[in-house]
Image: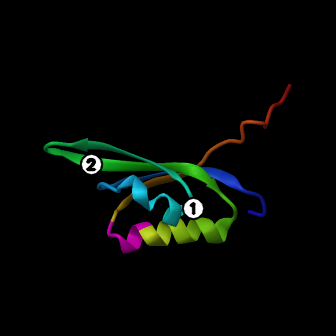
């Protein structure tokens, strides 16, 4: 992966939005709570695989189990 790519990463547990800068500037959204298991979704662009590995390693170090990590299609990728 030589070019930046946009990822959507979902983990079990809650993560405060203050972690965004540490996690490649990804947007952080947490759902659940009040007796429901929380899930956190991170979405944003990472510059390369090394940056992606850093995000995933940080989530692992925080003890947040990975549910999914998906590379999203480019918005400017059209077949007209």
Q: Are marks 2 and 1 in contact (CB under 8 Å)?
A: no
> Residue 58, which numbered label?
none
What residue did someone put label 1 on?
24
Height in image: 77 above or below 63?
above
Query: Mark 1: which secondary structure?
Result: loop
Residue at 42% over, 66% down: 59
Asked whether, in this view, residue 43 is left or right of residue 2, the answer is: left
Which quadrant of the rendered structure holds the N terminus?
bottom right
Height in image: 58 above or below 42?
below
**Highlighted range, magenta:** 59-63
- The residue nearer to you, when weighing 36 against 44, is 44
Closer mark to the observer between disc 2 and disc 1: 1
Which quadrant of the rendered structure holds the C terminus?
top right
Q: Position of residue 34 (x, y in %)?
A: 15, 42
Q: Position of residue 53 (x, y in %)?
A: 56, 70
Protein image colouring = rainbow
Spatial separation of the CA atoms under disc 2 and disc 1: 22 Å
Magenta segment: does it hold 20?
no
Decide whether the magenta segment is chiefly helix, strand or loop. Answer: helix
Q: Quadrant of residue 58?
A: bottom left
Asked whether, in this view, residue 19 is left or right of residue 80, the answer is: left
Asked whether, in this view, residue 35 is left or right of residue 40, the answer is: left
Height in image: 8 above or below 75?
below
What residue did someone put label 2 on?
38
Residue at 80% over, 32% down: 78
Q: Position of residue 27 (x, y in %)?
A: 50, 48
- The residue nearer to you, when weighing 79 against 40, is 40
Residue at 77% over, 58% down: 3
- The residue nearer to you, when weighing 25 against 8, is 25
- The residue nearer to you, when weighing 29 against 80, is 29
Residue at 41% over, 53% down: 17
Query: Mark 2: which secondary structure?
Result: strand
């Amino acid at each position: 992966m030589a070019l930046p790519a946009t990822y959507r990463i979902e983990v079990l547990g809650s993560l405060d939005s203050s972690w965004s800068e540490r996690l490649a500037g990804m947007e952080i959204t947490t759902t659940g709570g009040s007796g429901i298991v929380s899930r956190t979704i991170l979405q944003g662009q990472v510059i390369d695989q090394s940056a992606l590995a850093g995000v995933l390693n940080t989530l692992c170090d925080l003890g947040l189990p990975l549910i999914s990590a998906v590379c999203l299609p480019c918005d400017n990728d059209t077949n007209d």
